[in-house]
Amino acid sequence: MYASHPPGNGDYTMPPSAPPIQGVQGCGSCSLVVAELRRAVRDGDLSAEVDARVKIRRHMRQVHGTEIPFFAG
């Protein structure tokens, strides 16, 4: 199933957006990636949004030892 071929009567609504991600206060890398994420969301660039979410999750895990839970919508 693709977004261009939604199920049912053809009416399709986007799933709710994921909650905002906050980086670690004072971490320059977190600030940069969170700014990238906010810019992508603002511009409606879904590809850049996914890329930024992957970057911040990876950074938080590797540098800060924190896991950001997946958003199930």
Image: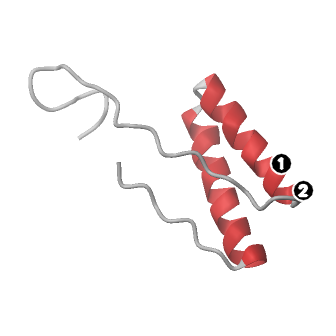
**Which three-letter amino acid code belongs to the residue tagged 2?**
Gly
Mark 2 to mark 1: distance in Å? 6 Å
Residue 16, percent across and down? Answer: 38, 37
Q: How many marks?
A: 2
Residue placed most toward the observer, 40 or 26: 26
Residue placed most toward the observer, 8 or 16: 16
Q: Secondary structure at mark 1?
A: helix
Q: Is residue 10 left or right of residue 73?
A: left
**Which three-letter amino acid code belongs to the residue tagged 1?**
Leu
73 relative to 40, above or below: below
| Rendered residue at 67%/49% (across/down) | 52
Q: Secondary structure at mark 2?
A: helix
Q: Is residue 69 left or right of residue 24?
A: left
Instruction: Give the labeled residue for mark 1.
Output: 32
| Rendered residue at 73%/47% (across/down) | 34
Instruction: Give the labeled residue for mark 2.
Output: 28
